[in-house]
Amino acid sequence: MKNYKEQSNAIAAVLSSYFEGVYSGDTNLLRKIFHPKSLVVGDVNGLAYFKTLDEYLDGVANRKSPKELDQTFKMEILSIEIINSIAIAKVHLPIFDFNYYDLLSLNYTDKGWVIVNKLLTNVKIY
């Protein structure tokens, strides 16, 4: 494995693509950075959320994107932890009326870093 700085920069590039895909609704870009067997799991306002990658991307494709709705881009990386060929990224995605926090599991493959699992929750702001 390359050094931590090189790996964290490579992961940050994947996360940047993730943010751009979510923000613009670009499912082709999202499909490139997710492993095909990825799961998207969590809760939205206390309701269980469990989708395959295809189900998740279908939802992204069939909604107006934050970019189309002229929303301000506010997504950010909060942390990245790397151990050998695995990593966890904590990210914040305030979009629409949601205040999402994601934990993204990544794995280093022959194609570089890919997202293999997405855990999400909406944290209500009181």
Image (spheres, rainbow, N blue to C red):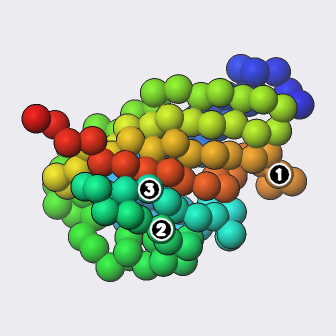
On the image, numbered disc 1 is attached to which residue? 109
Picture quarter containing residue 84? top right
* Comes first in the chain, label 3 or label 1: 3
Question: In front: mark 1 or mark 2?
Answer: 2
Disc 1 versus disc 2: distance between alpha carbons?
A: 25 Å
What secondary structure is marked by label 2?
strand
Residue 10 at x, y percent in the picture: 68, 36
Q: Residue at x 38, y 75 (%)?
A: 59
Res. 50 mark: 2
Residue 17 at x, y percent in the picture: 52, 49
Disc 3 versus disc 1: distance between alpha carbons?
A: 25 Å
Q: Residues within 10 Å of mark 1 (few under 14, many from 20)?
A: few
Q: Are marks 2 and 3 in contact (CB under 8 Å)?
A: no
Q: Residues within 10 Å of mark 3 (few under 14, many from 20)?
A: some
The residue lying furthest to the left in this view is 126
Query: Can residue 92 be seen here?
Result: yes
On the image, numbered disc 3 is attached to which residue? 42
Q: Residue at x 48, y 77 (%)?
A: 55
Three-letter code for the amino acid on which mark 1 is drawn:
Thr
Residue 62 at x, y percent in the picture: 32, 79
Picture quarter containing residue 66? bottom left
Three-letter code for the amino acid on which mark 2 is drawn:
Phe
What secondary structure is marked by label 1?
strand
Q: Residue at x 68, y 69 (%)?
A: 37
Relative horizontal placement of residue 32, taking residue 83 as reference (left or right): left
